[in-house]
């Protein structure tokens, strides 16, 4: 079908053109049908970029914990104090590669298509996971604060960069296909998907390093216990609709040099041009802290 510049879909035309150009129409269909999709590495970025992203996460981990993980020996690595999982929040600004990951064309197109033109990043997070006999997460939804019935459209999405191979033994994400249509979060008796008499069956998402796993905020998911040795490395980009509260206060946290080296779309994605909050004293939006939104920068993906 020939795409047109239709007035009735003015907010969608350019976004869908990007989806088609990037070969993501199948991913859109899978999101609608099953509540999740996997984008293969060759559609996302180069192998070198994925290695840079992985190594940047390991560097942040070492700066924050003092614990070194050798990127060449992750298959035998262990986390400090034998912890099963370590979460590193607030990665944006730690290394330019996290900014480039946010502006990746596939990420940008999928986030805008699924959550609208004014989509915002809620946070950029790393998860490091080692072997442990218990599952890290039981079945849950990412927008648990939404009362049932949950809307048919997504308000939150998770875009996960798999920076090491994902298999069931490596502690893959567990997903319940089609659960985004249930309109509710799992009941307490449904959360443990690993017990023999579990009423709900979850399936592992298995894919090679460099893939993107994308699921919606109403899709039931958890994670399988990691049984293999070594450490799994993942970058999670959590997005939400513009009327929802972000995890990070990006307008006040983001240094000007970060905004200066990125395009205006970056500033919009982190909420720099958001109408809210209103300055309670002046009764107007504090535009001073958002003035960098108009600045131009070089898009590393152009």
Image (cartoon, rainbow, N blue to C red):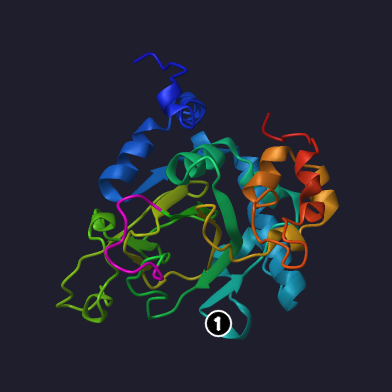
Magenta span includes 156: no
Residue located 32% across and 56% down the image: 151
Q: Nearer the viewer, residue 45 or 240?
A: 240
Find residue 168 and report its horizontal and vertical position in percent: 35, 62
Q: Is residue 83 left or right of residue 220?
A: right
152 in magenta: yes
Q: Main secondary structure of the magenta part?
A: loop
| Element on which disc 1 rests | loop
Q: Compared to 109, does 197 lie above or below?
A: below
- Residue situated in front as seen by the camera: 151 or 205: 151
Q: Quadrant of the N terminus?
A: top left
Q: Residue at x 46, y 75 (%)?
A: 131
Q: Which residue is at the front of the view, 68 or 229? A: 68
Q: Give residue 113's position: percent from left, percent from top.
A: 45, 39
Residue 116, x across and y down, in percent = 48, 42
Task: Please state if 287 lies on the left or on the right of 150 as rendered.
Answer: right
Q: Is residue 221 visible?
A: yes
Question: Residue 205 appears in which quarter of the rendering?
Answer: bottom left
| Residue ID at (40%, 62%) | 172
Residue 150 or 46: which is nearer the viewer? 150
Say which residue appears at 62% left-offset and 63% top-offset.
73
Range shown magenta: 144-154
Q: Which residue is mark 1?
A: 83
109 shown above or below 36: above
Does any portion of residue 94 appear in the rendered image?
Answer: no
Q: Position of residue 230 (x, y in %)?
A: 53, 69
């Amino acid at each position: 079908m020939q795409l047109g510049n239709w007035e009735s879909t003015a907010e969608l035309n350019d976004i869908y053109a990007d989806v088609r150009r990037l070969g993501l129409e199948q991913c859109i269909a899978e999101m609608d049908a099953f509540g999740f999709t996997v984008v293969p590495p060759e559609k996302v970025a180069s192998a070198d970029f994925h290695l840079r992203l992985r190594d940047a996460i390991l560097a942040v981990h070492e700066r924050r914990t003092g614990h070194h993980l050798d990127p060449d020996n992750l298959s035998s690595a262990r986390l400090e104090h034998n912890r099963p999982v370590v979460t590193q929040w607030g990665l944006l600004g730690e290394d330019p590669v996290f900014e480039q990951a946010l502006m990746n064309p596939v990420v940008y197109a999928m986030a805008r298509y699924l959550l609208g033109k004014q989509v915002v990043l809620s946070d950029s997070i790393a998860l490091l996971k080692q072997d442990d006999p218990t599952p890290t997460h039981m079945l849950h939804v990412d927008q648990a604060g939404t009362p049932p019935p949950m809307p048919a459209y997504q308000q939150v999405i998770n875009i996960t960069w798999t920076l090491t191979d994902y298999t069931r033994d490596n502690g893959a994400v567990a997903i319940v296909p089609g659960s985004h249509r249930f309109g509710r979060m799992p009941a307490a008796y449904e959360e443990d998907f690993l017990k023999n008499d579990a009423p709900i069956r979850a399936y592992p998402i298995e894919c090679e390093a460099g893939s993107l796993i994308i699921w919606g905020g109403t899709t039931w998911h958890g994670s399988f216990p990691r049984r293999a040795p070594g450490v799994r490395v993942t970058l999670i980009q959590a997005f939400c609709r513009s009327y929802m509260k972000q995890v990070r206060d990006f307008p006040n946290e983001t240094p000007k040099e970060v905004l200066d080296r990125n395009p205006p779309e970056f500033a919009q994605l982190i909420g720099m041009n958001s109408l809210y909050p209103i300055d309670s004293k002046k009764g107007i939006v504090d535009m001073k802290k958002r003035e960098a939104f108009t600045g131009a920068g070089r898009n590393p993906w152009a």
